[in-house]
Image: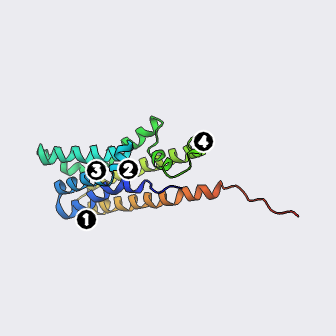
Amino acid sequence: MKKGGLLPGFIPLITYGTFVAISGVTIALAAATVAAIVIGWTDLQKGLILSWANLVLFGSMLVAIGILDMTWIIPYMGILIYAALASVTFGSILLKKAFTLQYARGMVDKALWDNPLFIRVNVFMTGIWGGIFSINAGLNAIALIAPGPAGHIFQVLTYFVLVSGIIFTMWYPGHIRKKYAPVPMQDTG
């Protein structure tokens, strides 16, 4: 099995979430864009959907806010980011190129790439991520309209949803491997 995986593809999003609380939106967008390039360089060269989505998403928001001074977007950033990621995720399923397949193929033997179970598992995982991004877009929408502490609670919930997705992504492939592992033959003699 090869090294790699999906989780580095979330570093730009995590970078944005960390920096926005500390340094503001423009610096957070710049940091996320740099992370998308530096951490995702190899994945960008391979044409991985999530890496390109990160670069286009955070880079275009950086241009819109940092250069074009479209600061009216700022209150809607959480909704826009998660809605864009959900769109890319569900779009990858509709185009029959579930984005998790790109990462999974880098981690398994090429003989499994066309296996129907392997494809179904990755379409399912991609769908889970589409759901996670959609839930977080909704939580950000609620946070935008909820006053004070209630809004902050919904904002914090997005991190729990994201971490739950990461835990699921780390657990589920191993669960499927165990579930469908060949049963060892017992010695009858």
Q: Which residue is mark 1?
A: 149
**Circle 3 is placed at which residue position?**
37
Q: Residue furthest top?
A: 95
| Mark 4: secondary structure | helix
Q: Earlier in the sequence, mark 1 or mark 2?
A: 2
Q: Which residue is mark 4?
A: 116
Q: Quadrant of residue 163?
A: bottom left
The amino acid beneath tag 2 is Phe
Q: Is residue 146 visible?
A: yes
Q: Amino acid at mark 3?
A: Ile
Residue 133 is tagged as 2
Closest to the camera, between mark 1 and mark 4, is 4
Q: Quadrant of residue 149?
A: bottom left
Q: Secondary structure at mark 3?
A: helix
Q: Quadrant of the C terminus?
A: bottom right
Q: Which label sits in the foreground, 1 or 2?
A: 2
Q: Which mark is residue 87?
A: none
Where residue 43 sits in the image (x, y, percent)?
Answer: 37, 48
**How is colour applied across the structure in the image?**
rainbow
